[in-house]
Amino acid sequence: MSKLIVLSNRVNLPKSDNTQAGGLAVALQDALQDIGGIWVGWNGSRVDQTKEQKFQILKHQNVEYHTSPLTESQYQGFYCGFANNALWPLMHDQHQLVDYQPQDFKIYQDVNLRFAKHLKQVASPHDIIWIHDYHFLSVAHYCRKLGMRNRIGFFLHIPFPELRLWQTLPAHRDLAHHFANYDVLGLQTSRDQENCLNFLEQTLKVQHRHNEILNYQSRKIHVKCYPIGVHPVQLQNQASDTHLEKLPFDLDTVQPYKTIISVDRIDYSKGLLEKIGSLQSLLEDQPEFKNQFQQLQIACPCRLDVKTYKNLYTQFKAAVHELNSQHGTADWLPFDCSYDTLGHEALMQLYRKADICWVNSIRDGMNLVAKEYIAAQDPLDPGVLILSKYAGAAEQMKEALLVDPYEHDSMAKALKKALRMSKSERLERYRYLSQGLKNFDIIRWRDQFITDLKNSQSLRIYRPVAAGASNQFSVHA
């Protein structure tokens, strides 16, 4: 009987403190629990030498967790370097921040090869393999070089950029060839899907395309859109649990103003500085809005080993201080910020208590905060979602108040509307948004991808014709 093998950068281990688990880890945890199989990834630790890099295996119920550390040089080159100094800004349309170093790309390839070798060791011939996110774009390439014939799918959780952006990356042709070794390529939105199809079609000089299928060197590459969802029933239960979790903000005391919740990593893709700029403009131009709202921000520092992130963290704290200094009073601050991570159940309860949720991404693959906020709402008295049109979730959640984070006037208008929205309009918007979550939940996302992967029609496998000819393949049945 075939099993499912998942590879992602981080693994959400059972019985561990998962307060820092991101949207990807939580989604995969939900997806694997019902199916069972093996989850492979980095354990978050670093060692000095490669001889200390052993995979640790933990069995829990019907899932095996295979995790391994990175060496310090791998962490710097693979994770901080190519993945987060080159791919991440490129894929979030921040090409001015891209720092491509050939040595980082080499280390990235070495790490992808290492995980491919482990997949080779643990996979049976009929197992299906599901690779996740930008850390592992090249894994299927090495699996094929190792002779693996398994169905291998890839899902990208972040945006897929346009061809013009890929062409600024010296390694883009190598990566296009590596993409071509997957049977199914999954993207978050129809825009990402079309960008991916165009990138592969133009870069690989594909001669035949039928809708979402590319015919390339006797292979069929399926490029499809799978918008990731949440588990609405589970989140609703967590949000309404009478056992209340400890929250970083006092929302039980009746306040004379409405509360706006935002939950973000301190990342330039999240539009944090743009949000503060919009609040600054609103309070300067329309001071009557003072004392009418309070922005509650959970801002989790991340990747502080990367200079860009360390600088952003400093800028963000300074901007919050300046906003509160200019517009705050003895009894009210416009911006209250917590830098601590919050457990998932506490987060759902926080969403339920907040009047408004504000997602201000300048580019985002999906953004599960928007979906989780709606799932956590009181159906009889729901809050309002303000959502950036540049978040992938905006493609599905059109009943939210969609805004352009670069336009302060647009933001101010949406904020005013959210603060003054009638209960009847809130209920009507919520009904549509809530139904959308049920129609495209985490189970449908998982089942649709796995079904397509099992049914994919890639009938050939590539093997290198000579040592060192990484992109030259002969065809084997």
Image (cartoon, helix red, strand yellow):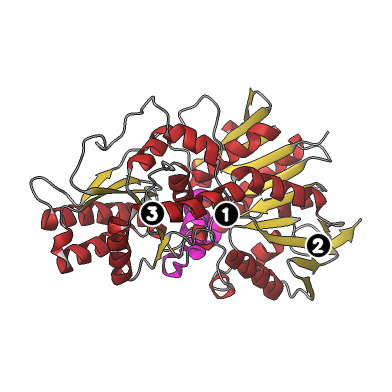
Q: Name the outermost residue toward the front.
A: 424
Amino acid carrying label 3: it is Ser
The residue pinned by badge 2 equals 220
260 vs 401: above or below: above
In x, y percent, where is residue 459? 87, 56
- As for residue 96 lying within the magenta part, the answer is yes
Distance from the alpha carbon under mark 3 to that under mark 2: 49 Å
Q: Residue at x 16, y 49 (%)?
A: 333
Amino acid carrying label 1: it is Tyr
Q: Nearer the viewer, mark 3 or mark 1?
A: 3
Q: Residue at x 32, y 38 (%)?
A: 340
The residue pinned by badge 3 equals 424
Q: Residues within 10 Å of mark 1 (few under 14, many from 20)?
A: many
Residue 167 picture quarter: bottom right
Marked residue nearer the N-terminal end (3 or 1)? 1
Marked residue nearer the N-terminal end (3 or 2)? 2
Q: Nearer the viewer, mark 3 or mark 2?
A: 3
Q: Which residues are magenta?
A: 79-104
Label 1: element kind: helix
In x, y percent, where is residue 33? 64, 32
235 vs 448: above or below: above
Amino acid carrying label 2: it is Lys
Marked residue nearer the N-terminal end (1 or 2)? 1
Pick the residue in front: 242 or 63.
Answer: 242
Q: Residues within 10 Å of mark 3 (few under 14, many from 20)?
A: few
Would you say residue 225 is visible in this rendering? Answer: yes
Would you say residue 107 is visible in this rendering? Answer: no
